Image (cartoon, rainbow, N blue to C red):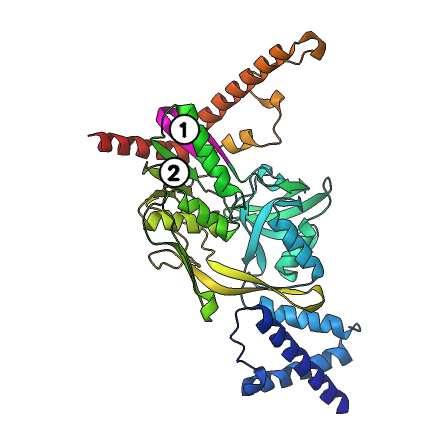
Amino acid sequence: MSSLKNLLKTICLFTLFMFSSISNVCLADGNYSPLDSPEFFEGLNTFTAVYSQIKQLYVDEIDDETMFKNAIKGLVEGLDPHSSFLDPEDQSDLNESTMGRFGGVGIVIGTKGSFIEIISPIDDTPAYRAGLQAGDIILQIGDQNVNQINLEEGVKLMRGAPGTKVKLTIGRPDIAPFVVEITREIITIVSAKGLLLDEGIGYIRISQFQNPTAELVDDIVSELVTENETKLDSLILDLRNNPGGLLNSSIDVANLFIDSDGIVVYTEGRVSKSDVSFPTEAGDILNGAPIIVLMNKGSASASEIVAGALQDHRRAIIMGQESFGKGSVQSILSLEDGFGLKLTTARYYTPSGRSIQAKGIAPDIYLEDITLSSFEDAINLSSQEKDLKNHLLAESPSELSEEDILEMQDEITENRDKEYIELLREDYFVHEAINVLKALKVITNK
């Protein structure tokens, strides 16, 4: 009995430590104590009874540290798919991911039931080139059944040294499960790129929202205006399969195109510090030129914030499919000894008060069964010059002057851009967006 009392005391102290640690770094009001709740002690009695039975009867001996870690993980991960308890290695992996460069296959994932769902493949990554799609379900990673592990363990299994391989068993509606073998690479994300289409129509693809994305988009628009030799008539902003990224980046991108007073997005949680509004800033770099935002079910989080803001401010027409619906805020809380807590603390709302969470952004014009065209395959950084149509043959450097080399490079760039534009025009999403923009131009000029 004394050992059980000591265990109860240890757990109480540990729990109090956890709550005090969180209140010091989080949004909590600091006036809650688990000791004030009768339900806490009822639950603690059950916990200690289960803990004691495991220690005495489980087939293998498990140390107390492992038991506590497992208990805390269960406590946090039972809340929602995005909350998790982070050990020091998890913290390091998370920091690595937010820097936009890490070793792996290149997908953004979440949980769906007991399995892992692909929210979006990241542009120009092994997973994207292997044909993985938003909505695919990962059933197995190697020989490991996914329903036996949590999300973080799944991430660890898929990450690894560049050049190594991992097999994924994929479930997709209407076809039998299939296996894809993917070679890991260092994943470096290029967040935005753009081209000028005919008749003054600009096209910008944002694959993820990073720190420099808004500045990059601003620069791309300036370059397109220079190339067009006058201001753009309209813009296609492609957010398909964009899994999100940094909140501040999405706010900055939205503010590039909004000139009206109001907010871009706001958050609400249980405590006052979770309630934050992010205001619009004056200045529209397109001077009111029409915008169409392309979205699909792989568009999530920050991309939904941008689309929702532009839609509510009547600044853009949203075309495509209903987005993913990831509208919750995760706070990273530091605990002692390098541990951390990723905890959902609020929900995102569009300027008009629509919740994004589990609802997504509904398009103004719905397009069915749309996927990215082969344009994205052609524009991948890994594609080689020899793969391009009408590529130039190699010559010995000694036979070419510097002027000849520069002329060749200009010709290669010109041919490549022409081919990309042709591929874009064949993309059904983009094709329909161009038709709508041309129609708007006709109506406006009447």
For mark 1, what is the residue? Answer: 225
Where is the C terminus found, in terms of image quarters? top left
Gap in Å between the C-alphas at discs 2 and 1? 11 Å
Whichever of callouts 2 and 1 sits on the residue coming sooner in the sequence is: 1
Which residue is the extreme one toward the left?
446
For mark 2, what is the residue? Answer: 285
Regarding residue 338, the answer to whether it shows in the image is: yes
Mark 2 neighbour density, 10 Å: few (under 14) some (14–19) many (20 or more): some
Q: Residue 366 appears at what percent x and percent y?
A: 35, 44
> Which one is in front, 406 or 353?
406
- Residue shown at 67% from the left, 53% from the top: 93
| Identity, as a three-letter code, of the amino acid under mark 2 | Ile
Where is the N terminus found, in terms of image quarters? bottom right
Q: Residue 243 appears at what percent x and percent y?
A: 51, 48
Q: Main secondary structure of the magenta part?
A: strand
Relative to 60, say whether 446 is above or below: above
Q: Secondary structure at mark 1?
A: helix
- Residue shown at 63% from the left, 54% from the top: 94
Mark 1 neighbour density, 10 Å: few (under 14) some (14–19) many (20 or more): some
- Residue shown at 68% from the left, 84% from the top: 49
Which residue is the extreme one toward the top?
399
Q: Residue 265 appears at what percent x and percent y?
A: 40, 55
Relative to 295, say whether 57 is above or below: below
| Identity, as a three-letter code, of the amino acid under mark 1 | Val
**Left-right relation of 263 to 42:** left
Give the magenta-colored segment's residue range: 193-203
Q: Residue 385 appears at what percent x and percent y?
A: 61, 22
41 in magenta: no
